[in-house]
Amino acid sequence: MNAYPSKEEMMQALKERHGTELQTCFSAGVVAICGLGGLGSNIALSLARAGVGKLILIDFDKVDVSNLHRQQYKACQVGMYKTEALRENLGEIAPYVQIAVYTERITKENAKQLLSEADIICEAFDAAEEKGMLVNYVLEKMPEKYIIAASGMAGLGPADQIRTRKITDHFYLCGDGVSDVKDGIGLVASRVMLCAAHQAHMALRILACEEFQ
Amino acid sequence: MVKVNGKEMDISGVTVSEYLAGTEYEPARIAVEKNGDIVVKSSYDETVLQDGDVVEIVSFVGGG
């Protein structure tokens, strides 16, 4: 295997791509990703590639063979905790991004502690009730944070129905708003990745200094 | 009139809780925004909708 490029080489490449000023904004950012399934694993990859400074990865679950059709894990990682598997994969792609992992379920009791360091929180859960819990919790108890949530990305509906909407100054919602995983064929990689890309892109837009928005 | 998700409704004087009770929204799966701010869950009972309010009810569906 080839040796990894040095930290300086990778940072130089990011600065050449994004410009020094924008990369400085990305590198200073801390983003928490709540849930590491189809949304969360894809959000993490985009943000790590963009050189976001620190990612906080939170999930209690293990990689299952049924996840591989849409989540950024490898067949050889079935049975590993998603936190550990994703840390491994991100480490191969963007070895100098800081990663913190919490292998536990996010609840109203531990959310404040797990999320305190984050500037931006990406809601990437599966269950509608969990989405509702986290979004309401963050908006109520941590109003200084940004939350980027997702609702509606199941099925084979048109790609361009996935969109990002600003609900309040600190709350953005991605998805088509209606395609429930319980209806129809469930989730497919391409449409979940679209929604994850919307979330990751919104996070980068928030981190970017104002003149880039 | 109160605008809810883009639709004018004759519900001024009604609380958020009272309005939701007459709909199919499941309280655990929603967030309520009014005039640019979130309405916290614990205040649904006291928050009275006023003439001219613009409300958005965000309803979450499963999948991720």
Image (spheres, grey):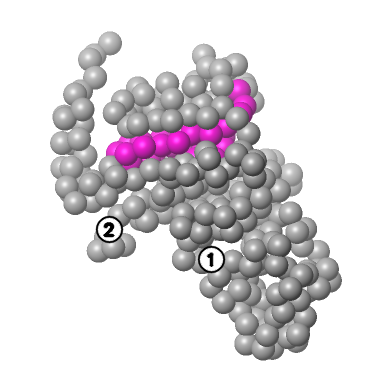
Give the SS element for disc 2.
Answer: loop
Which residue appears at 16% of the width and 30% of the height?
A: A8
User: Considering only order in the chain, which callout, 1 or 2, is on the residue closer to the N terminus?
Assistant: 1
Chain letter of disc 1?
Answer: A
Which residue appears at 43% of the width and 45% of the height?
A: A118
Q: State yes or no: residue A34 in magenta.
A: yes
Residue type at the position of mark 2: Cys
- The circle on residue A209 is 2
Tell me the quarter of the picture where residue B54 sits. Answer: bottom right
Q: From what the image shows, is residue A3 above or below residue A12?
A: above
For label 1, count other residues whose C-alpha is less than 10 Å away and answer few (under 14), some (14-19) or many (20+).
Answer: many
The residue beneath circle 1 is A167
Residue A147 in percent (x, y) is at: 50, 53
Mark 2 touching mark 1, by CB under 8 A? no
**Where is the C terminus of chain A found, in terms of image quarters?**
bottom left
- The stretch in magenta equals A33-62
Q: Tell whether B45 sits left or right of A25.
A: right
Q: Tell whether A175 sits left or right of A8.
A: right
Give the SS element for disc 1.
Answer: strand
Q: How many labels does the image show?
A: 2
Which residue appears at 28% of the width and 11% of the height?
A: A1
Residue A3 in percent (x, y) is at: 22, 15
Residue type at the position of mark 1: Ile
Residue A150 in sight in this render: yes
Residue A94 in percent (x, y) is at: 32, 29
Chain letter of disc 2?
Answer: A
Q: Nearer the viewer, residue B41 or A35?
A: B41
